[in-house]
Amino acid sequence: MQATLAELAVLVDGRLVGDGNLVIQGAVPLCNARPGQITLLDGCVDRLARLDPTRISAVLISQSAVPGGIPAIVVDEVHAAFAAIIRYFDPPRSQRRTGVSPLAVVSPTAILADDVDVQPLATVGDDVRIGSGTTIHSGVRIMAGSVIGRDATVFPNAVLYENTVVGDRCILHAGAVLGAYGFGYSLVDGRHVLSAQLGNVILGDDVEIGAGTTIDRGTYGPTSIGEGTKIDDLVMIAHNCRIGKHNMLCSQVGIAGSTTTGDYVVMAGQVGVRDHVHIGNRAVLGAMAGVINNVPDGCVMIGVPATPEREQKVKQAAFAKLPEMRREFKKLRAAVEQLSRQLGEAPPQDTRKDCPPGRRAVA
């Protein structure tokens, strides 16, 4: 498939700069660009002048960029336009509605809307309800009493324990597990006894759950994920948590039990949050932050333990200076000892503990 640069400009409602008759045969990222292809340039627009016209036939740029010697299409939203061009050259596979496969296992008490797809080897338990337009892929296990809304997609091998509730237009990626038992135990007569596991998991509308992510059921009530929240792969959310609306949780975040968050919270990769704390509205937790206390609204926290960004940066700057400060301290101590000898006074006593033979004390 191919198109002229002028045709692509019309496709993305962009402004053409250069030869509109140039034939384009594909769209790829900058690192893979070859002659006959179009690429995009975002962020570092100063690189535009350094692009090699022998490698790249055309470029998609934003309104803030100044076109160089390479033919270009200028648009308001670079990524949205580039996605449209990629779809033109490589259209996504159409998902034909297939209905309920005869190789799926569907309980006679389950209620499925007329246009629900249930693919081979999926299992739908007793009293499950699934809304119209929803697709259940192969290997999915939906246990008794669960409810899935309209236009949702559950990818292969996801598991929904009993009474899980999934809102409209949710996406559950492969291997996600919703409603597993919470990690709560009481020590009774020297043995760990599992606590009550009587709750469930509830997802609001437009929630996305990444591959391999796990969300445990509540002890007595629900563990809930608010409307519009997006959760990356390999995230762990423990029992009784209540995650607010439109949160963004990146990969390998771990949230301990009974933690709550406000709306529009962002947690970067590998953030760890202890139990029974609250993360305020629009708070941002930097990568690998270790949260042990409540976080106020709008606060940016980094480090372990997590502290406000400015405070943590001051600490890190001071820590980086410790070797230099140690050297200065040794010089000052030597100067004081020399001055004491000159004045005929005893030098200051070294209060450090004695070291084993052959080892030096560290100032």
Image (tube, rainbow, N blue to C red):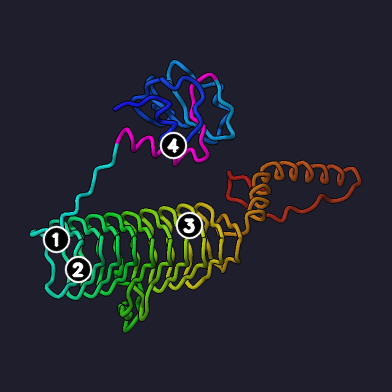
CA gap between label 2 and label 3 equals: 39 Å
Q: Residue at x 21, y 70 (%)?
A: 143
Gap between marks 4 and 1 measured at Cα: 38 Å
Residue for point 68% across, 44% down? 321
Residue at image mark 3:
271
Of the numbered discs 1 and 2, the one sitting upstream in the chain is 1
Q: Which residue is mark 1?
A: 100
Badge nearest the viewer, 4 or 3: 4
Toward which corner of the image does residue 224 lie, by quadrant? bottom left
Decide whether residue 80 is among the magenta residues: yes
The secondary structure type at the circle numbered 1 is: loop
User: Looking at the picture, which amino acid does disc 4 mark?
Assistant: Val
Residue at disc 3, secondary structure: loop
Q: Which mark is residue 112?
A: 2
Query: Residue at (48%, 22%) from the top-left corner?
Result: 71
Q: Earlier in the sequence, mark 4 or mark 1?
A: 4
Q: Nearer the viewer, residue 168 or 318?
A: 168
